[in-house]
Image (cartoon, grey):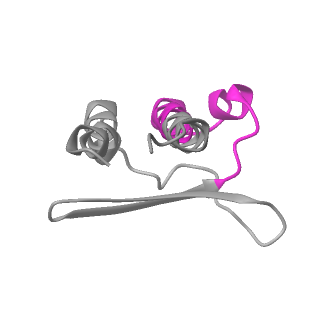
Amino acid sequence: LPPAVGDHPRRIIEESGITKVDDSAWPEPDDRCRRQELEIKIGNEHIAFACAEIGSLLDVQSSADPEGLRNFYYLTQDLKTLIFSLVSLHFRIRPIP
C-alpha cells in the first residue's frame, strides 16, 4: 500500500480523539453477549478498548458515558468502512499485464 493509505487510519484515529477517552463507564462485556474491542498502537501509545456490543445509537445514548461511547461507535464505523472499501477496491481492479 502507498504511504498515504497507511497514514489515513492513523489520521482518522488521531482526529477522533479516542486516545483521550476512558472506557471504564462503558457497558461491560460478559460471557452471554457479544463484545466489541479495538486495540490502537501508534508510536509509543498503546490503548485497548472493550465494551458490550453496540446494537444502535440508542444503546449509546442510554450508557453512562454517551459522549465517549459515541466517539468509539463512530470511529469503529469509519475504520470498518475504510477497510471494506480497500478490500473491495483490491478485488475490483484488474492489474495491467
Q: Is residue 48 shown left or right of residue 42?
A: right
Looking at the image, which residue is at 73% across and 68% down?
A: 30
Q: Is residue 84 shown left or right of residue 71?
A: right
Q: Residue furthest left?
A: 44
Q: Position of residue 91 (x, y in %)?
A: 60, 44
| Above or below: residue 94 compared with residue 37 | above
Q: Position of residue 81 (x, y in %)?
A: 55, 34
- In which quarter of the view is residue 96 placed? top left
**Number of marks present in the image shown:** 0
Give whichever of 53, 10 is nearer the camera: 10
Looking at the image, which residue is at 34% across and 61% down?
A: 47
Q: Position of residue 11 (x, y in %)?
A: 26, 36
Residue 77 lies in the magenta stretch: yes
Q: Residue furthest right?
A: 32
Residue 32 lies in the magenta stretch: no
Q: Position of residue 54 (x, y in %)?
A: 69, 42
* Magenta-tinted stretch: 52-80
Please, what is the dominant secondary structure of the magenta stretch?
A: helix
Looking at the image, which residue is at 26% across and 44% down?
A: 2
Looking at the image, which residue is at 71% across and 34% down?
A: 59
Q: Tell me the quarter of the image containing the C terminus.
A: top left
- In which quarter of the view is residue 68 placed? top left
| Above or below: residue 60 compared with residue 43 | above
| Above or below: residue 38 compared with residue 65 | below
